[in-house]
């Protein structure tokens, strides 16, 4: 096989593979998610909570957990709701979501965040936070189906 024919075959195969990846994203669906997370810490923080995923007319219970490292002082309760996209099945929501950030909450505040997991699920969440919390940290949030 000549080098130009080989290049043409490689380009064609690459385009076919890319097309397969795009078609799975194009077929992906979306749903809604609601979570409640309690976070507390002194340098190292922990969070835990629960929530629900509504996907294709069914509701699935979720379990939330996570750790934070950096500057973390205080405790807060956060209620978030929003959209989850780029999922094909409920289990696509399960995974680890990482975030870095800084903030402070005294009393009540508003939160908004966009997170992605290793499966490509995208969470677009907003809500309210109550408590006393000061943070500048790296944190991870793990979501699992109950």
Image (cartoon, grey):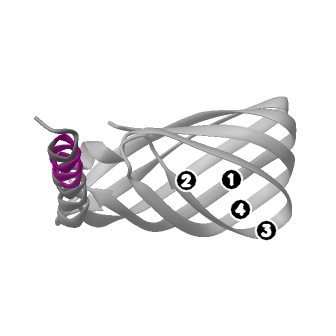
Helix, strand or loop for disc 4: strand
33 to the left or right of 90 = right
127 to the left or right of 86 = right
* Residues under numbered marks 4 and 3 in contact, where contact means CB atoms less than 8 Å apart: yes
Q: CA distance from mark 1 to mark 2?
A: 7 Å
Helix, strand or loop for disc 2: strand
Q: Could you tell me which quadrant the C terminus lies in?
A: top left
On the image, numbered disc 4 is attached to which residue?
129
Q: CA distance from mark 4 to mark 3?
A: 6 Å
Badge 3, how many Cα within 10 Å: few under 14, some, many 20+?
some
Give the mark, 4 or 2, whose residue is nearer the N terminus. Answer: 2
Q: Which residues are magenta?
A: 6-15
**Quarter residue 87 falls in:** bottom left
Q: CA distance from mark 1 to mark 3?
A: 10 Å
Q: How many marks?
A: 4
Q: Position of residue 60 (x, y in %)?
A: 27, 50
Q: Nearer the viewer, residue 16 or 11?
A: 11
Give the mark, 1 or 2, whose residue is nearer the N terminus. Answer: 2
Q: CA distance from mark 1 to mark 4?
A: 6 Å
On the image, numbered disc 1 is attached to which residue?
77
Magenta stretch, main secondary structure class = helix
From this viewpoint, which residue is outermost toward the top? Answer: 44
On the image, numbered disc 2 is attached to which residue?
36
Badge 4, how many Cα within 10 Å: few under 14, some, many 20+?
many
Vertical placement of residue 52 versus 72, above or below? below
């Amino acid at each position: 096989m000549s080098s130009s024919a080989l290049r043409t075959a490689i380009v064609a195969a690459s385009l076919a593979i890319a097309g397969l990846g795009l078609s799975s994203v194009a077929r992906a669906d979306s749903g809604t998610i609601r979570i409640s997370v309690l976070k507390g810490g002194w340098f190292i923080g922990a969070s835990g909570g629960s929530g629900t995923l509504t996907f294709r007319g069914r509701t699935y219970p979720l379990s939330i957990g996570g750790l934070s490292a950096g500057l973390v002082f205080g405790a807060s309760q956060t209620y978030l709701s929003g959209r989850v996209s780029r999922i094909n099945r409920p289990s696509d929501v399960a995974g680890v979501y990482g975030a870095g950030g800084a903030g402070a909450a005294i009393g009540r505040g508003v939160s908004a965040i966009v997170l992605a997991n290793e499966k490509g699920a995208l969470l677009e969440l907003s809500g309210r936070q109550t408590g006393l919390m000061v943070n500048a940290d790296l944190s991870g949030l793990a979501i699992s189906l109950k």
